[in-house]
Amino acid sequence: MAKQHQDSVWPYIYSGRSLNNNGFKMTIYNKGIGPALIKSVSINVDGTNYNSWQSLLNQYDLDTLTFYCSNISGTIISPQEEHTIFGLTKSTEALLVWNKIPNINVDIIYCSIHDECWNSNGSQIKKINSYESINGICK
């Protein structure tokens, strides 16, 4: 019965990116049936980790771009809710990032209300037993 109860509140977090007339954005979605407590979010491009959006843009000589971002570590994302964690509203800048950094992923550590935790890395979700918290990537 306890397993059935845990399954009935299972969060399912994944990230996506989009480019349209309104710009570029990275978004986190909870497509599960339970709330997700976000423990940590980190940025990864082709196996290299970045501690902030600014450090990523600096690496690709895009440090003059104007972006917006949101730190969601420590927040709860309800079922069917989404949060934009990074974005560019100028279409020329958005297209530049889309083309110059095509493999941006975010690694997300999140837990259910029963303290079961997972790592979602853009291509797969794995259950984990321990994790390292990362403060905020919106620097």
Image: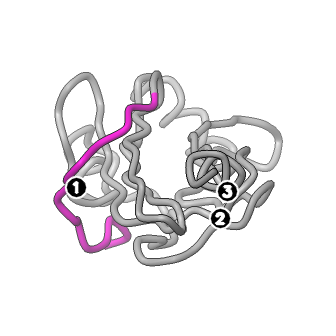
| Mark toward the viewer: 1 or 2 | 2
> Magenta: predominant secondary structure element?
loop
* Left or right side of 111 for 6: right
- First reached walking from the N terminus: tag 3 or tag 2: 3
* C-alpha distance separating marks 3 and 1: 36 Å
Asked whether 78 falls inside the magenta stretch, the response is no
Where residue 75 sits in the image (x, y, percent)?
A: 52, 77
Asked whether 128 falls inside the magenta stretch, the response is yes
Residue name at image x 82 percent, y 41 percent: 21
The circle drawn on residue 35 is 2
Image quadrant of residue 121? Answer: top left
Where residue 38 sits in the image (x, y, percent)?
A: 46, 65
- Residue 88 position (above or below residue 59): below
- First reached walking from the N terminus: tag 3 or tag 1: 3
* C-alpha distance separating marks 3 and 2: 7 Å
- Residue with the mark numbered 3: 9
- Residue with the mark numbered 1: 55
